[in-house]
Amino acid sequence: MDKDKLPVMLFAIISLLMPAALSATDPLLNFCSADVRNSQFESNLERLLESLSSNTSIAGGFYNDTVGDGLDIVYGQALCRWDVNSTVCQNCVDEARQEIFKSCNKTDAMIWYELCQVRYSYQMFFQLMVYTGKYLDKDSQEKNVSNPHHFNDVLTYLMINLSGAAAFSPSKRMFATGKIKFSGKDTIYGLQQCTRDISPSDCHSCLNSALTDLLGCCSSQQGGTIVSRNCNVRFELFPFFNDTSNSLLIYPQSKADRWKKWKVVILVSASIILLAAIVFCTVHLWRKKGSEDVKDEEKSEQVLLQDLPSPTGVTITEEGMFIISEELAFMDLATIKIATNDFSDLNKLGQGGFGTVYKGLLPDGKEVAVKRLSKKSWQGLEEFKTEVVTIAKLQHKNLVRLLACSFEGEEKLLLYEFMPNKSLDVFIFDLERRAELNWKIYYNIIEGIARGLLYLHEDSRLKIIHRDLKPSNVLLDHEMVAKISDFGMARIFCDSQNTANTKRVVGTLSLLLTAPIFIFRTC
Ligand SMILES: *[C@@H]1O[C@H](CO)[C@@H](O)[C@H](O)[C@H]1NC(C)=O
Ligand SMILES: *[C@@H]1O[C@H](CO)[C@@H](O)[C@H](O)[C@H]1NC(C)=O
Ligand SMILES: *[C@@H]1O[C@H](CO)[C@@H](O)[C@H](O)[C@H]1NC(C)=O
Ligand SMILES: *[C@@H]1O[C@H](CO)[C@@H](O)[C@H](O)[C@H]1NC(C)=O
Ligand SMILES: *[C@@H]1O[C@H](CO)[C@@H](O)[C@H](O)[C@H]1NC(C)=O
Ligand SMILES: *[C@@H]1O[C@H](CO)[C@@H](O)[C@H](O)[C@H]1NC(C)=O
Ligand SMILES: *[C@@H]1O[C@H](CO)[C@@H](O)[C@H](O)[C@H]1NC(C)=O
């Protein structure tokens, strides 16, 4: 093996044990576990390793074999890097065969070299993907790059492109290399490979896990390697693979440009929200003050309500009872008590203006948020129920969905879809969690809030004004999609007769995303 052509790699365990004996043929890492092998297993293993060593290079750099049976069966697999020729592959597997046999006497082991990897086990592992990523401590990792943020972006761009190419290339090689221009003179070289027994989607998910680890450990350093059982990824600032293509990826946009674009988008959308809020507020105030007969207005709103088709399946009988429907179910109090552990403090998600919210687990396994209304509604029960059905009809991607309700005696409960990411305030008022949000997520959240409000104000025919929009009322689902909650509550709880109260607009200035957003509270 030509030592000059191969970069010397150092690794934690071996380098500590025998720093003087380093050569290009040292293993990167090894793994050795399970029981100590018996003599029958050992003789099977010898035959297996022999087979791997003589057949892998002939088979095109990937080979698996099984020797023995019963308790002493041995499964084995060897993989060479795609870009090395058969001589190099043969030598590497041969080296690995000797090393793995001598350095480990257990029944499950794996060894990684720069150019090949060999694994054996008493358990069948072919076609199974298990991510076990380990990163290697190397010289290059002690050297930092000069512009880590930009480096991280460019590296991510290259590696994501390569993971797609490696996993889904029609050649079924499960191997990809590439390079991308970084700053003036630097080029980043990347390599990714999977064992060829797993499916393309398993390969892709293995590589994605490895990339997450790689960016975590090494994204501001001049090189990094993650090895796992089924895949490995590596990048360096020098060519370390047999580079046969001349294509050089170009990073599409500089970060400064992107930031400028986001800034414009954020400012424009914030201004639109602000303007819309002011317009609606002004119109609302003017209407309340200017019109003599508020009664008439309400009458017309009632007419509007009656015009609406009743939601499919929901019927309000003369007694005001709900019939279970697809859109809004009526649930009995006992079921909700079980779901929330009798409103246990452990299930408490938060305390809102209109009541306490609990997490509930329904008998069918569905997670819900249960709002236990504490405030007394100014309306009678019938009007209250009508309002709830009305609110349930408001369905939009950016509104929290009301799933069911329950009324028994003084107890009034509303069941909403459960939001695993809680609310916006949890993120923006906490330094650590704020770091989890990037500008794309911020933009999506702002857009979601704007769409939700637009629907409430313009498209829903009911023209609901939220009156209490604040970060804690913007919930986030598992994909960080913003969903407005507590809309329509003012209709239930704010006494529209109490004009003195409705006229008072309290504006709270909140520093969200560096752009001011006004919050109006009227009840
Ligand atoms: C693999 O190698 C062994 C020798 O170690 C040989 O007997 C066997 O026939 C080879 N198998 C294939 C499929 O080439
Ligand atoms: C090699 O692995 C494949 C599955 O990936 C399996 O079908 C085949 O039997 C294995 N070959 C040997 C010799 O064990
Ligand atoms: C590099 O790849 C080319 C084409 O695949 C091959 O001809 C050449 O021998 C390889 N060089 C090395 C050093 O493996
Ligand atoms: C294989 O590649 C090595 C260097 O990587 C080279 O020295 C050797 O001549 C090549 N062998 C063949 C058969 O191409
Ligand atoms: C092999 O196992 C024995 C215990 O049975 C242990 O003492 C010995 O150190 C092991 N050898 C190696 C190379 O791991
Ligand atoms: C590289 O950066 C890390 C933190 O990012 C720092 O701890 C380390 O000392 C730096 N190393 C060098 C050689 O500058
Ligand atoms: C990688 O980038 C190249 C060049 O931009 C492009 O042609 C190719 O489709 C990309 N591959 C993947 C998997 O994204």
Image (spheres, rainbow, N blue to C red):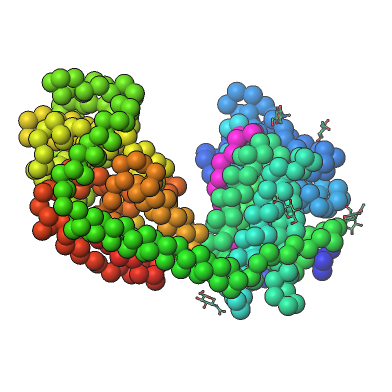
Viewer-nearest residue: 486 or 424:
486
Viewer-nearest residue: 441 or 55:
441
Which span of residues is magenta-colored?
A: 125-136
In this orientation, does residue 195 appear?
yes
Q: Quadrant of residue 240?
A: bottom right
Relative to 496, is 278 on the left or the right?
Answer: right
Q: Residue at x 7, y 35 (%)?
A: 410
Q: Is residue 363 magenta?
A: no
- Relative to 421, is 338 above or below? above
Secondary structure mostly taken by the magenta-highlighted segment of the chain: loop
Viewer-nearest residue: 320 or 95:
320
Q: Residue at x 81, y 60 (%)?
A: 247
Viewer-nearest residue: 410 or 173:
410
Q: Quadrant of residue 273?
A: bottom left
Question: How far from the left and from the top, in percent, is residue 492?
Answer: 17, 43
Q: Quadrant of residue 118?
A: top right
Question: How far from the left and from the top, in percent, is residue 505?
Answer: 20, 63
- Location of the C terminus (image quadrant): bottom left
- Location of the N terminus (image quadrant): bottom right
